[in-house]
Every structure is written in structure tokens, then in C-alpha cells.
Amino acid sequence: MKSDKKSLQRITRPILDDIKLFEVEFKNALKSDVTLINMIGRYIIFRKGKFIRPILTILASRVCGEPSLNSYRAAAMIELLHIATLIHDDVVDEAEKRRGFPSINRVWKNKIAVLMGDFILSKTLINMVGLKDFAALQLIANTSEKLAAGEILQIEKSISGSMTEDVYYDMIYQKTASLISTCCELGAITSSGKDKDRMAMINYGTKLGMAFQIKDDLFDILGNENSTGKKIGADVKRNMITLPLIYAYQKINKSENRKIKSILSQKKKTKTDLNDLKEIIDRVGGFSYALQKISEFNDQAINALSPYPDSPYKKSMVDLISFNTQRKG
């Protein structure tokens, strides 16, 4: 995690002043007249994440032109939307930790967590209206729909067990890549406003987002709880089928197929079960295949930036691609 922090510090060096302006907008957007909301808001701010999404909005605005006040406000709204989805995700997943600390549903229970997520989502939309930019508002609204649809699609496929590679890519686009794409597109909308910039940022953000989610899926099986801040094997325990397992299903024999299905059918999966699953996936090349797909999406993301001249901001966007590949959590 320390190496992640150092890498991000280097990546964000060209936009440190921009980040300060974003943080002002972010903190103001969380304020309320309700004491409990402010208490949870302070808990969220104190345990803030890496701010990858607002960083992308700011960098995209710099690559495409000059950031406006709306760029910083849009960056804040993107982070709020992300937080709202995380709070709801933790309720759905019955997660006890988020970023290494007790999750909001663990501290304040599910009712408050759901309502807090709803409150933050409503604040996101209200503040987006305040930008007086219909294109930005429409983009955020559409993305909110995709995020929810992606999560529901994942649950549906975990129940039916009918996940294919194409469906998997559609799912991770909706639940993860769509938001990262939106971060970048908002940077273009609030700076140059040009269609060519919007398309380039959509392309970059989508490819980075796809690689980002595949990396997260690898963490679920191969990660370290101290680094990720989340329980390892959480997706497997809920029968969430990810890319390494999809690939493995295509390569294993009947005996191993029965073994995997037996593991996934168990309500309580032990460390031994997870290790057995990991061994089968590794032996048939499931993890290697996932890393290969990350590399392919990385190359496509870098290519999306090719029309832009070299600059510290473009370099930071390229470095974020490497950061995703190398991050520990």
C-alpha cells in the first residue's frame, strides 16, 4: 500500500493545486443540517480512498484544455457517486470492511447505510443540476443507471451460473468501466467541450476501467487482506464468476469441473476450498489469461491518448495505466 501511495503522489504532482480545489467542493457537497449525516460524512472523509476517479476528471480536463470551476465540481460529484455505490455494495455484499476500516453498514447498520447511500446519490444529482450543463447531468444520470444494472446482472449470473466471457465484459463495463469512462468524459465536457475530446476520453476511460475491474477480480483470489482492505475470496464465496474462472471452465476436465462446482455449491467455503480453486485456475492458465487481457486493455487505453501532445498531464494518465497494473490494493 505504501508503494501505491508513493506512485499516486508522483502521478498527481502536476495537479496538486487542482486537487485542493476539488477537495473543497467535495467536502462542501457532503454537508447537511442532519447531525448523523455530518458524522458519517466525516467518517467517509477521514477514511478517503485514492481519489482515482476525480484525479482522472482533472487530468482529462488538463489534457483536453483548461479546467473550469465545473471541472472541480464534476470531479467532486463523481467521487460522491462512487461512494454511494460502495456503501450500497457493502450492504448487498454484507461486507464488514472498506479500505481497511469497518464499513458504514458495520458501524451504523444496514438501514442507515442504505439511506446514507441514497442521500449521497441525491446530493450528486442535485449538485450536477447546479452545474447548469445538461450534457454533464445526462451523463451522470445514465452512468448511475449502468452502475446499478451491472451489479444486478452480476447477481443474476451468480444465481444462474451462466456467465460467459462476453457477458462478463458487458457486466464489468456497466458496473465499473462506465464510471471511469464518465470521469474522463466529464473532464472533456467541462474543459474543451469538443466531441473529439469526449470520444477520446470515453475510449481511454473505458479501456482503463475494464483493466481496473479485472485487476480487482484477481485481488479477490490472489490478493492480501492487509493490502486490499477487504476479505480475500469474498466474490468466490458469493459465487461471483470472474474472468480467471470463466477461462478455467473452458480448459478443465470433467473431474475438475465437478470439483469447482462442488466448491461453489457450498454455502461456507473454507481456506482449503479457496486454495484448491486457486490451484486449478492457476494450472490451466486462468490468471495468466486475465493478466493478458489487462495488458490488451492497457495498450488500447494508451492508444486513445495518441492524438494529444506530450505533457505532464498526459504522462500522468499513461502512468495511471501502469499504476493499475502494479497496485497492491
Image (spheres, helix red, strand yellow):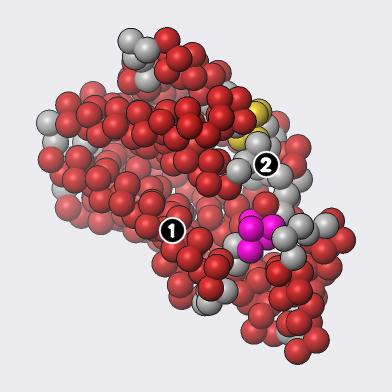
Amino acid on which the number 2 mark rests in the picture = Lys
Quadrant location of the C terminus? top right
Q: Residue at x 78, y 59 (%)?
A: 269
Badge number at residue 130: none
User: Which image quarter is the N terminus in?
Assistant: top right
Identify the residue at image location x=53%, y=53%: 212
Whether 220 is among the magenta residues is no
Tag 2: Cα neighbours inside 10 Å, few (<14), some, or many (≥20)? Answer: many
Mark number, residue 152: 1
Q: Label 2: which residue? A: 230
Q: Main secondary structure of the magenta part?
A: helix
Q: Secondary structure at mark 1?
A: helix
Image spot of residue 326 (x, y percent): 65, 49
Mark 1 residue type: Ile
Q: Position of residue 184 (x, y in %)?
A: 34, 45
Q: Which residues are magenta?
A: 235-239
User: Could you tell me if residue 6 is visible in this image?
Assistant: no
State which mark lies toward you, 1 or 2. 1
**Eyeballing the image, is 185 above or below 276?**
above
Q: CA distance from mark 1 to mark 2?
A: 21 Å
- Looking at the rendered structure, the number of numbered marks drawn on it comes to 2
The residue closer to the viewer here, 148 or 68, is 148
Q: Earlier in the sequence, mark 1 or mark 2?
A: 1
Q: Give the image location of residue 53, x and y in percent.
A: 43, 39
- Where is 44 relative to 287, above or below? above
Name the residue at the bottom extreme: 254
